[in-house]
Amino acid sequence: MLRFGILGAGRILAKHGPAFALVKDAQLVAIASRDLERARAAAQQYGAARAHAGYETLLADSEVDVVINALHNGLHCEWTIRALEAGKHVLCEKPLACSSDEVERMFAAAHSCRRWLLEGFMYRFHPQMVEAQQLVIGGAIGRVVHIHSRFTGYGRDSQNPRYWADAGGGALMDLGCYCVNLSRLFAGEPQQVQARAHIENGVDLTIAGTMVLAGNATAAFFCSFESEGSYGAEIIGTTGKLMIPHPWLPPASPAELILTRDGQSETIRVNAPSPRFGHFALEIEHFCECIRENHPPQFPPATDAERDSRGNMRAIELLLSAARLNP
């Protein structure tokens, strides 16, 4: 039985916490917060045996094998490295870090400590995304020529770390990282990028970007803290197109893909874990398998997760640099 501890009692805990009820041979045993009462309330809600006042005490807990780093972006690097050095494997929420330099330091620590590190792009583990990849790889829409994706939603209180420049805040880091990741998944690494953004206090609140990807496919994305919630992705090929209406957080099973060819649309229903956050459980199960069998984490069906994390951070940096030149 692998024993998990979670750093942070914020909103992401409400997605990770229930997932453990669906995972075999893994247990949530500890939750840490700088506010002990908040940690106690969360531990009681999700059945964790212990609540820790502060992150250091959770890392010192000998009954924790694996740490989920659910802190804000600006704390990912520091506390992931400290967890690895404490002998814990780490599942770190996306985006993995605030820069490529941080990503390199985190994986260097993982290698040095002989522990596994996985970036928490849970949407990659949902069966609908595996099905979408198989359709595209199998030639269902021909050669990919363009990808369009969006992820928007009204932001939270301005005191939230998502609005802090020194905490890795911004719409691209928080929401657009998904769009960048999906574009790279289906069409490779960016060769050229352009972006424009609405920036306040050093933080992009809205950003639109384009990328020229491998094989001359293009991608366009839009993400924002300033608009009504909107989600979706469309992959356009030479002989058809594939729409993913809910790529990031699909509703309860079945998920749906819409495949269009020759003017005819077909809805493909994909069975998935019944609870809405079941793909978090699939992510945890995969990480547990990696730890038990001592092999590197992969995004299904067979993408090296470490390499993917490096590529995603490089692409985000390119887009942020372009946006700051064209505010």
Image: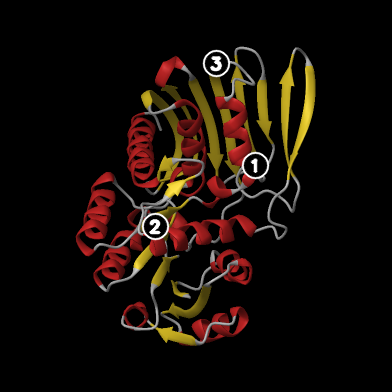
> Where 39 sits versus 16, above or below?
below
- Camera-side residue of 170 and 98: 98
Between residues 24 and 251, which one lies in front from this camera angle?
A: 24
Position of residue 48 in the picture relative to residue 270 (left or right): left
For image coordinates 49% across by 20% down, the residue present is 218
Q: Earlier in the sequence, mark 3 or mark 1?
A: 1
> 10 Å neighbourhood of mark 3: few (<14), some, or many (≥20)?
some
Query: Which of the 4 quarters of the picture holds residue 7?
Result: bottom left
Label 1's element?
A: helix
Tag 3, which secondary structure?
loop
Residue at point 69%, 57% (across, down): 276
Q: CA distance from mark 2 to mark 1?
A: 27 Å
Residue 234: give its label.
none
Q: Earlier in the sequence, mark 2 or mark 1?
A: 2
**Mark number displayed over residue 143:** 3
Q: Residue furthest front?
A: 293
Task: Report x, y in % for residue 48.
Answer: 53, 82
Badge 1 amino acid: Gln
The colour scheme used to paint the residues is secondary structure
